[in-house]
């Protein structure tokens, strides 16, 4: 069929795009029907799970409205759900979600040694994870009527998986590996690399094989975590001997990226891919679900996907550590306010604190930016520095000095005998600035401009001293992740820490 279409000079994408038009119209309802769509989702979740152990214990059958749900169910961290999940992993049925859940995403949202195992039900795969992937294409095609995305191959990075407690057909591993394992076989016809390569556990071997398998294919789109994708693309360039990626893949048009903020990598991708026809689209997909998509290329905020198998609630961050914080549904949020996100899903994660923080830029429709993690911040001296501050500060310092940041982490240096303290940053540069001192000064000044608490603590250097930058040797962060068995997949470096555990390990390896 593809051969006949090409002979007729017709675009495969031109034919396939018609299947996405109805969904484009459905997403338009987000503007005016958000509360109704979210309540429809909540009712469906409660009805499906009412006969599970959790549903019976929390009176799901008799819940009539949101207030009833909030009153009947506690707010949960992973620790509160861990015993239920472990029983599910052992093969027990009807615990948090109906039936037997066979797949578990090993969460890499943190880089400590304690793993989380997030259940991924058949419903969750279909109505959330795969729905998000489909909608990414839906929105992209809506914004790019000239696209020929389906006329080429998709390079999709994935992690690895392993048997779960040796139960038949039960897997535990990276979410991306679970998605690849269960994907429609038709998709394998238009993606690279082959399945066996995509699921390899050794990232260094996998990186080379992916590059070799993909470099001679007609790749039109790429999907993955920016840091690991950059590593693969660098290998493609080494093997091909080309200067720019479009010389290898002339029809490459879009990078669907997520997992970590794109800001530190943007300039490197622009240097690698110089084609004016290249597009970038941010996605917010996690082990627990698929939550957001960038629907406007000119707006970094993402559209909250409100008709999947996910019901959203939010806790204002200024109340996060209080004994009884305010919890609001989606229609109770305000723009410009930092919230911790909480979800209930079609995989049985009930009122679960995902650990991410978001800020809404619009409520018609609901659009947001990711501001950081509830655990990834520095507040050692009342400065309340969040990842969003760090990303913006680094972006300006890079712009003004011509530098390019590859990876970074930061942590406090606690008070000395004179009551002095500061923040210490370890930064691996793809392109180092001419003056580290100048880069540090711009970063420090920018943080003061955008964070009044940081500015107050920095006032006249009385408490918080100017920040310190330690230049990391090449591959320091990859080596640290490798030493922890976390190289590749969706693993990521903790950007900000309120203690020195991670940074001391990293500094030790920098010598």
Image (cartoon, rainbow, N blue to C red):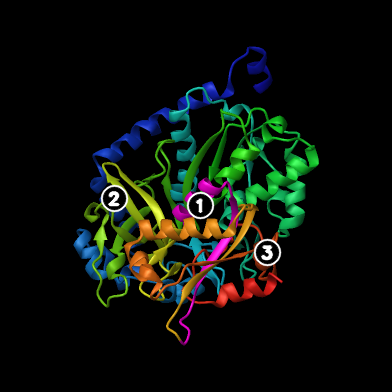
Q: Name the residue under label 3.
A: 476
Residue 397 is marked as: 1
Left or right? Give the position of 387 relative to 249: left
In this view of the protein, which residue sits in the foreground, 449 or 328?
A: 449
In this view of the protein, which residue sits in the foreground, 83 or 77?
A: 77
| Local SS, label 3 | helix
In this view of the protein, which residue sits in the foreground, 161 or 367?
A: 367
> How far separated are the C-alphas under marks 2 and 1?
40 Å
Range of residues picked out in magenta:
391-417
Q: Where is residue 357 in the image (x, y as percent from the top left)?
A: 38, 60
- Does the magenta-highlighted stretch encompass residue 410? yes
Q: Give the residue drawn at x 51%, y 74%.
A: 86
Neighbor class of circle 2 (other Cα within 10 Å; few <14, some 14-19, many 20+) is many
Residue 363 is marked as: none
Q: Nearer the viewer, mark 3 or mark 1?
A: 1
Q: Position of residue 226 (x, y in %)?
A: 58, 49
| Local SS, label 1 | helix
Q: In which quarter of the image is residue 242?
A: top right
Kindly give the residue lying farthest to the top in the view shown.
8
Q: Which of marks 3 and 2 is nearer the N terminus?
A: 2
Whether residue 154 is situated above or below residue 166 in the rendered picture: above
> How far separated are the C-alphas under marks 3 and 1?
21 Å
């Amino acid at each position: 069929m593809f051969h006949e279409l090409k002979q007729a000079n017709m675009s495969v994408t031109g034919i396939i795009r018609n299947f996405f038009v109805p969904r484009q119209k459905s997403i338009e309802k987000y503007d005016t029907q958000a509360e109704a769509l979210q309540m429809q989702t909540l009712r469906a979740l409660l009805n499906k799970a009412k006969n599970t152990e959790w549903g019976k214990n929390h009176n799901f059958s008799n819940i009539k409205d949101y207030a009833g749900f909030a009153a009947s169910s506690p707010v949960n961290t992973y620790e509160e759900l861990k015993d239920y999940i472990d029983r599910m992993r052992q093969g027990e049925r009807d615990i948090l979600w109906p039936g037997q859940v066979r797949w578990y995403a090993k969460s890499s949202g943190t880089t400590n040694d304690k793993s989380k195992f997030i259940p991924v039900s058949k419903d969750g795969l279909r109505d959330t994870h795969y729905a998000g992937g489909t909608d990414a294409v839906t929105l992209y095609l809506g914004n790019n009527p000239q696209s020929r995305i389906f006329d080429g191959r998709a390079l999709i990075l994935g992690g690895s998986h392993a048997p779960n407690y040796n139960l038949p057909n039960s897997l535990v591993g990276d979410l991306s590996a679970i998605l690849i394992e269960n994907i429609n076989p038709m998709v394998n016809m238009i993606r690279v690399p082959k399945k066996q390569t995509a699921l390899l556990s050794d990232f260094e071997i996998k990186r080379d094989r992916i590059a070799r398998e993909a470099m001679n294919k007609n790749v039109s789109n790429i999907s993955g975590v920016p840091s690991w994708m950059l590593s693969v693309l660098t290998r493609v360039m080494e093997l091909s001997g080309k200067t720019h990626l479009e010389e290898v893949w002339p029809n490459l048009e879009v990078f669907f990226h997520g997992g970590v903020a794109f800001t530190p990598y943007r300039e490197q991708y622009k240097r690698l891919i110089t084609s004016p026809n290249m597009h970038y689209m941010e996605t917010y997909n996690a082990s627990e679900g698929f939550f957001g998509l960038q629907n406007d290329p000119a707006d970094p905020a993402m559209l909250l996907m409100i008709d999947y198998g996910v019901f959203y609630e939010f806790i204002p961050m200024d109340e996060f550590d209080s004994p009884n914080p305010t919890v609001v549904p989606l229609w109770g949020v305000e723009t410009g306010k930092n919230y911790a996100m909480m979800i209930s899903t079609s995989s049985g994660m009930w009122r679960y604190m995902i650990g991410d923080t978001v800020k809404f830029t619009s409520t018609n429709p609901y659009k947001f930016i990711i501001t950081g993690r509830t655990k990834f911040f520095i507040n050692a001296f009342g400065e309340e520095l969040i990842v969003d501050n760090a990303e913006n500060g680094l972006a300006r310092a890079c712009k003004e000095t011509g530098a390019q940041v590859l990876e970074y982490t930061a942590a406090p240096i606690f008070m000395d005998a004179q009551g002095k303290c500061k923040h210490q940053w370890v930064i691996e540069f793809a392109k180092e600035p001419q003056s580290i001192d100048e880069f540090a000064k711009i970063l420090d000044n920018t943080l003061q401009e955008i964070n009044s608490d940081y500015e107050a603590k920095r006032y006249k250097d009385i408490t918080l001293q100017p920040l310190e930058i330690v230049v990391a040797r090449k591959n320091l962060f990859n080596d640290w992740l490798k030493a922890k068995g976390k190289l590749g997949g969706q693993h990521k470096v903790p950007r900000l820490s309120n203690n020195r555990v991670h940074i001391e390990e990293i500094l030790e390896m920098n010598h």
